[in-house]
Image (cartoon, coloured by chain):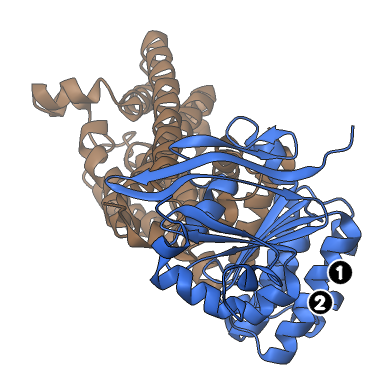
């Protein structure tokens, strides 16, 4: 594994972002809009609550954490899509770059872009609406880690799907977080959901994070077993996504799709 | 040990569903040798090149770049290989310098900055250094692609119609540069082109491919006469139209 080759993928994305306002803007614009919108919604909801209860860490904090997961996922997919959009697969995969080095580059790019989004959200939520990350205590670290890794897993999985189904299938990828959000209990406790949805929630690592987050701000203990289970699940998702991408890539090399990707299919 | 072959292809075969694209071809390329891979459209030239580049898995057969099997030692083999093709332009949203830097890192080029400056001068690209590749003319993009192909001083250079979009003067200049590069660095070159004048001028040996098989092989200067034709172009047309008379069915 060559770190230089992995760094080349990051450098390529850095060059693209540096020279393009349309790439810089989405790094912070949508998350900033989300913070402002949900900040005011939260403020409004707080007018109906009794003293001592605040929606800020429950709702605005949840939006922030969920947006962080989405940014982590999109950090991977957008870096991958740059190769799709510029029809660069033949050039890039005819170099000594291995698939794991390539995925490593996508993940590193995502670390940078999702960190930018997180900082912007924190600054806005803290300065405008009084959200304090200290409200979550030390549990914030595993929360962020699980959400980031799950976002990475979704990003790799989504990239693999686009590699398998062709450039037009990128529109399958954008709504994935919106499909998962209702099951993950981002805005409400899982007990709100019908049983069949709760069964699915058990398989989604973010659901444990958001349940844990609500427990922390309510002063209740967080289940260490549940958090450990969510961590194990997350690792499984990352490994599955990696396996799926590698398998899809090998298939694309076998069928010739890598060299003729713009055709979308070789059949 | 001195390696005499930079590329060794054995019994290479590629089947797409019911279509046999490459049918058990074998050939070698030596150091300092430029080999032309000729044939009509759909003969299997690009399929062969893609298999050598490791972006297409052969149905059977082996490819060795120097002593390395592309199937099992892909990264090491590709460190010594590079290519340029008209159908694979570099990303148009990066500048010439940025593209060369990114690909230089991917190929593990030492003293990369120095190497890029040399190539910018060599391919007359200095004034386009900070221009996005998508804004260049097709001829200029071809030169950037060739500069990328030389970045890692490859032992094996694969060129798929490298001069297709160049004017005659630039094309001649580029041919000379590639020939000098091959001669000085002990490089082996696999060159496809539909310009028979170019092939006769540049190649030490040609392979005529038709329907996935190598039909003829030899010196481009003497091969036409050996088959009763005046020029390489006439021979090419005969291969394209009447492959059976030249032994395709053999």
Pointer 2 and pointer 1: residues touching (CB < 8 Å)?
yes
Q: Which mark is residue A10?
A: none
Residue B132 visible? The answer is no
Q: Is residue A8 above or below residue A18?
A: above
Looking at the rendered structure, the secondary structure element under dot 1 is helix
Dot 2: within a 10 Å radius of its alpha carbon, few (fewer than 14), some, or many (20 or more) residues?
some
Residue at left offset 70%, top offset 34%: B68
Label 2: chain letter: B
Q: Across the whole image, how many numbered discs are drawn on residues?
A: 2
Quarter where residue A248 is shown:
top left
Residue farthest to the top, as pictured? A225
Is B85 placed left or right of B82 in the picture?
left
Is A206 placed left or right of B44 in the picture?
left
Q: Which mark is residue B176?
A: 2
Q: Colour of chain A?
A: brown
Quarter where residue B191 is shown:
bottom right
Quarter where residue B182 is shown:
bottom right
Q: Quadrant of the N terminus of chain B?
A: top right
Image spot of residue B92 (x, y percent) = 57, 73
Q: Colour of chain B?
A: blue
Q: Which mark is residue B180?
A: 1
Image spot of residue A129 (x, y percent) = 43, 51
């Amino acid at each position: 594994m060559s770190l230089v080759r992995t760094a080349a993928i990051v450098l390529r994305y850095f060059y693209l972002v540096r020279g393009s306002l349309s790439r810089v803007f989405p790094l912070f614009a949508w998350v900033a809009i989300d913070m402002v919108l949900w900040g005011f919604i939260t403020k409004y909801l707080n007018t109906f609550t009794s003293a001592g209860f605040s929606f800020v860490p429950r709702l605005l904090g949840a939006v922030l954490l969920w947006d962080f997961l989405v940014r982590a996922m999109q950090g991977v997919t957008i870096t991958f899509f740059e190769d799709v959009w510029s029809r660069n697969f033949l050039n890039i995969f005819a170099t000594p770059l291995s698939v794991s080095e390539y995925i490593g580059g996508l993940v590193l790019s995502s670390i940078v872009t999702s960190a930018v989004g997180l900082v912007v959200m924190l600054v806005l939520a803290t300065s405008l609406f009084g959200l304090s990350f200290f409200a979550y205590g030390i549990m914030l670290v595993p929360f962020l880690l699980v959400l980031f890794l799950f976002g990475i897993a979704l990003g790799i999985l989504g990239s693999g799907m686009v590699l398998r189904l062709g450039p037009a299938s990128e529109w399958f990828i954008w709504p994935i977080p919106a499909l998962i959000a209702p099951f993950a209990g981002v805005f409400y406790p899982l007990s709100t959901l019908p049983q069949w949805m709760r069964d699915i929630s058990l398989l989604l690592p973010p659901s444990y994070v958001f349940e844990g987050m609500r427990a922390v701000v309510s002063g209740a203990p967080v289940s260490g077993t549940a958090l450990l289970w969510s961590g194990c699940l997350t690792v499984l998702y990352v490994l599955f996504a990696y396996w799926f991408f590698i398998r899809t890539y090998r298939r694309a090399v076998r069928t010739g799709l890598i060299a003729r990707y713009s055709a979308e299919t070789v059949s | 040990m001195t390696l005499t072959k930079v590329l060794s292809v054995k019994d290479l075969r590629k089947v797409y569903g019911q279509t046999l694209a490459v049918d058990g071809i074998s050939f070698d390329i030596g150091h300092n040798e430029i080999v032309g891979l000729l044939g009509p459209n759909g003969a299997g030239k690009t399929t062969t090149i893609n298999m050598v580049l490791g972006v297409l898995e052969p149905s059977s057969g082996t490819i060795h770049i120097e002593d390395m099997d592309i199937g099992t030692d892909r990264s090491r083999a590709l460190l010594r290989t590079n290519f340029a093709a008209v159908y694979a332009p570099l990303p148009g949203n990066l500048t010439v310098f940025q593209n060369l830097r990114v690909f230089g890192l991917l190929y593990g080029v030492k003293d990369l900055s120095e190497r890029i400056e040399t190539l910018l001068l060599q391919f007359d690209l200095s004034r386009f250094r900070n221009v996005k590749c998508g804004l260049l003319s097709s001829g200029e993009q071809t030169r950037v692609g060739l500069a990328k192909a030389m970045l890692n001083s490859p032992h094996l250079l694969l060129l798929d119609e490298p001069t297709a979009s160049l004017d005659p003067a630039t094309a001649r200049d580029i041919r000379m540069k590639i020939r000098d590069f091959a001669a000085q660095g002990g490089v082996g070159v696999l060159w496809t082109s539909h310009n028979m004048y170019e092939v006769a001028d540049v190649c030490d040996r040609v392979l005529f491919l038709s329907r996935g098989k190598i039909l003829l092989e030899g010196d481009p200067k003497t091969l036409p006469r050996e088959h009763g034709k005046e020029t390489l172009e006439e021979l090419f047309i005969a291969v394209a139209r009447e492959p059976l008379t030249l032994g395709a069915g053999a």
